[in-house]
Image (spheres, coloured by chain):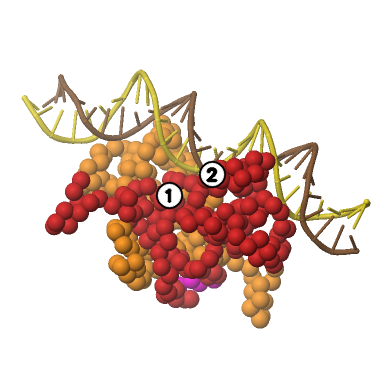
Chain colours: A orange, B red, C brown, D yellow
Amino acid sequence: MDTESIRESLETTGLRFTPQRHCVMAFLMEYPGHPTAAEIFEAVNRLDPRLSRATTYNNLRDLVQAGLVREVAVEGRAARFDAKGVRHHHFICDRCGNVEDVEWYEVPKPALSSLGKRTLRECELIVRGLCTKCAPAKGRDGVSAV
Amino acid sequence: MDTESIRESLETTGLRFTPQRHCVMAFLMEYPGHPTAAEIFEAVNRLDPRLSRATTYNNLRDLVQAGLVREVAVEGRAARFDAKGVRHHHFICDRCGNVEDVEWYEVPKPALSSLGKRTLRECELIVRGLCTKCAPAKGRDGVSAV
DNA sequence: GTCCTAGATTAGACAGAATCTAAATACGGT
DNA sequence: ACCGTATTTAGATTCTGTCTAATCTAGGAC
């Protein structure tokens, strides 16, 4: 999207601005869903065939570490990524593993007493179930049709 | 622990009772932490050297699917498992990836309207930060010492 | 504009985690 | 005891992600 704002984000986190980082970051900002690293590589490599797989993974790691990108681990599947824009929770489909956004709302944090000497950084909600594609069609009584 | 109760749990979910499943399930019920599949395999394989890696993974998958075991995905690391006993949330250490229990408390579910046609199964809280081992020692002013 | 250097990129080898395959085995109902 | 099917097994395989060592480049200094 906006090249200059990406440049600024990178610079404030101490990362150099490179065409490759711009490419990865811009893709994540435009892409509506939560792509895997492999999907991101495929996309950015199509735009610039010289952009390598290692660079894609390196940049994703750096961007996550810099706090510009969020990584979502999914049981038994590749991790998903999204650019941190508006805050939101995540929905993970039990069947296909797709990750979708859930509108943000405040969630109570655990009592400090229950954390002991642990440090709390963030508190994240994972909603699970079946996504629109995987949810079974409902009969008139609401029982799943198959 | 109690062999018969494990047999019953398996039977009610349609899984056959086998020494291997008992072994995996008993280990998870006794073990205090959240072992990875590799750690589980190492442990049960030590008890019965003929118990294979594939069986360990197969059984973990089946037990998770049957709802007897919970799987926790961790970014960039192997998944962790625990037998579903008392309800609890999970704490994941940013640095070492260890998974620990956080005392259970009710978390508000997202509004049905925001879920659309998606089906909601469960709502899970992931607390992130540094565990006791990884948390830096605090100076008198609370600033991290290293 | 040129130089310099720490940081970034690259291709391909490598490693770790989990699954697949096809043959052998054993659970548990009859 | 028998049978059908679920389960187990060893090892190969796939998938995800990291590492290596050589090359290149962003961007500050001059």
Magenta residue check for A3 = no
- Would you say residue B115 sits in the magenta stretch? yes
As displayed, is residue B25 above or below residue B78? below
The quarter of the image holding the N terminus of chain B is bottom right
Label 1 belongs to which residue? Answer: B75
Q: State which region is magenta.
A: B114-118
Pick whichever, A106 or A122, lies toward us: A122
Q: Is residue A75 left or right of residue A10?
A: right
Query: Who's the residue at 68% across and 64% down the image?
Result: B4
Answer left or right for A51 relative to D3. Answer: left
Q: Position of residue C25 (x, y in %)?
A: 78, 43
Residue placed at 66% from the left, 72% from the top?
Answer: A144
Residue A50 placement (x, y as % from top left): 41, 31
Residue B38 bears which disc, if any? 2
Report, in whole angstroms, how far the alpha carbon at label 2 lies from the one at label 1.
Answer: 17 Å
Q: Nearer the viewer, residue B103 or C23?
A: B103
Q: Which amino acid type corresponds to the residue marked 2 in the rendered image?
A: Ala
Residue D21 x, y percent position in the rendering = 37, 20
Query: Residue at coordinates 31% horizontally, 49% vertically from top-left?
Result: B134
Image coordinates of residue A16 in percent, x first then y, are 25, 38
Query: In this view of the protein, can residue B143 be seen by the observer?
Result: no
